Image (cartoon, rainbow, N blue to C red):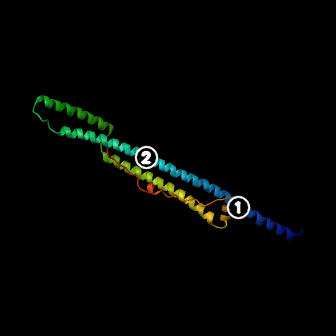
Amino acid sequence: MSKNTKTILIVIGTLLILPAIWGVIKRNWFKQTEVKINESESGIDVALTKRYNTLKKLVDATKGYMKHEKTVQTEIVKLRQPAKSDSLINKAAFADKLTTAAGNLNVAVENYPELKANTTVVKLQQSIQETEDNLQAARRIYNSNVNLYNKEVVSFPSNVIASMILASKKKFFEAEESKRRDVETSLDY
C-alpha cells in the first residue's frame, strides 16, 4: 500500500470514528440530562410538600397562639371591670379572681414572652414567602433543564441522535389553574 492510500484510509477512518464518538457522547448527554430533569422534578415535589407542611403547621400554630392570646386578654379585660357590689365578700372574690388571673398571666408570659399575635403572623408571612421562593427556584431549575434538553432535541445535528434514541421534547412546568391561585390561609379562631 502506498503512503497516499494509507493517509486516505486514516482520514476516512477518522471521519467515520469521530461521528460515532460524538454520537455516543451526545447520547450520554441526553441520558444525563434526563436524570437532571427527573431530579429537578423531584425538587418541585419536595418544595410542594414542604410548602404544604410549613403552611399547615404555621397556620395551626398561629391559630392556637392567637386563640390563647385572645383568651388571656378577654380574662384581663373582664377583670378590669370594677366589682359590681360594695360587699366585702364580692370584693374578696374579685380580688381572688384577679390574683388567679395574674398568676395565669404570669404563666402565659413565661410560656409566651412576647404575647403578641402580630409577631406570629409576621413569622407566618415570612415562612410562606421563603417557601414560595424555594418552590419558584425549583420550578426555574426544572424549566432550565427542560429548555436545554428541548433545544438539543430539535437542533441539528443532535436531533439525529435524539431521534435514534427516541428522545422527545419534555414539557415545561406549568401549574394547573387551581394551583396558580395563592394558598388561602384563614386565621379565624
Earlier along the polypeptide chain: callout 1 or callout 2?
Answer: 1
| In-image side of 9 versus 62 (left or right) | right
* SS for dot 1: helix
Rendering quarter of residue 76: top left
Q: Residue furthest right?
A: 1
How many marks do you count on the picture? 2
Rendering quarter of residue 34: bottom right
Looking at the image, residue 147 lies above or below residue 86: below
The Cα atoms of the two marked residues, 1 and 2, are separated by 46 Å
Q: Position of residue 44 (x, y in %)?
A: 51, 52
Q: Position of residue 12 (x, y in %)?
A: 80, 67
Label 1 close to label 2 by CB (< 8 Å): no
Rendering quarter of residue 82: top left
- Give the residue drawn at x 58%, y 61%: 148
Amino acid bearing label 2: Thr
Quarter of the image where the C terminus is located: top left
Residue 114 seen: no
- Give the residue drawn at x 38%, y 46%: 59
Q: Nearer the viewer, residue 151 or 111?
A: 151
Amino acid bearing label 1: Gly
Q: Residue furthest left?
A: 86
Q: Nearer the viewer, residue 180 or 36?
A: 180
Please tell me how crowded label 2 is: few (under 14), some (14-19), or many (20+) other residues with Cα within 10 Å.
some
| In-image side of 84 versus 15 (left or right) | left
Mark 2 lies on residue? 54
* SS for dot 2: helix
Q: Position of residue 7 (x, y in %)?
A: 83, 68
| In-image side of 73 versus 168 (left or right) | left
Q: Residue furthest top?
A: 89
Mark 1 lies on residue? 23
Q: Nearer the viewer, residue 168 or 1?
A: 168
Residue 75 seen: yes
